[in-house]
Image (cartoon, rainbow, N blue to C red):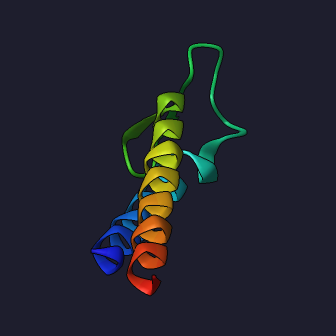
C-alpha cells in the first residue's frame, strides 16, 4: 500500500510539474497561458496537483511507518 501511494505521489508530482511549475511565470491575469507551439492552454488551478501529491506522499509515509511497527 505504501508503494502504491508513493507511485501515485510521484505521478501527481509529475503532472504538477508539467501543467503548472514550468509555466508559473507566464500565466496572465485570468490564470491562463496559451502555448502556441503545442496549442495547449495551461491554467493556474493546476496547482491542486501539488496538494494531491502531498496527500499521497503523506499516506505513503503513514503506511510505511504503520508497517514498521
Front residue of this view, candidates 4 and 37:
4
Which residue appears farthest toward the right when viewing the image?
25
Front residue of this view, candidates 39 and 48:
48
Q: Position of residue 35 (x, y in %)?
A: 48, 42
Instruction: Kindly indicate the quadrant of the structure image that contains residue 64.
Output: bottom left
Image: 3 above or below 39: below
Quadrant location, the C terminus: bottom left
Q: Would residue 49 be found to the left or right of residue 20 on screen?
A: left
Q: Would residue 12 be found to the left or right of residue 20 on screen?
A: left
Instruction: Kindly indicate the quadrant of the structure image that contains residue 63.
Output: bottom left
Quadrant location, the N terminus: bottom left
User: Residue at 72% across / 39% down in the picture?
Assistant: 25
Front residue of this view, candidates 63 and 7:
63
Q: Position of residue 37 (x, y in %)?
A: 45, 51
User: Residue at 46% across / 51% down in the picture?
Assistant: 55
Q: Position of residue 45 (x, y in %)?
A: 48, 29
Image: 50 above or below 3: above
Image: 28 above or below 40: above
Which residue appears farthest toward the front when viewing the image?
69
Q: Position of residue 29 (x, y in %)?
A: 65, 14
User: Residue at 53% across / 48% down in the picture?
Assistant: 50
Residue 13 in sight in this render:
no
User: Residue at 49% across / 76% down in the picture?
Assistant: 65
Q: Would residue 14 be found to the left or right of residue 2 on screen?
A: right
Which residue appears farthest toward the bottom when viewing the image?
68
Residue 41 in sight in this render:
yes
Amino acid at each position: 500500500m505504501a508503494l502504491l501511494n508513493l507511485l501515485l505521489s510521484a505521478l501527481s508530482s509529475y503532472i504538477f510539474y508539467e501543467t503548472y511549475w514550468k509555466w508559473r511565470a507566464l500565466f496572465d491575469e485570468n490564470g491562463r497561458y496559451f502555448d502556441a507551439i503545442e496549442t495547449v492552454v495551461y491554467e493556474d488551478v493546476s496547482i491542486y496537483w501539488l496538494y494531491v501529491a502531498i496527500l499521497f506522499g503523506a499516506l505513503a509515509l503513514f503506511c510505511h511507518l504503520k508497517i514498521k511497527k
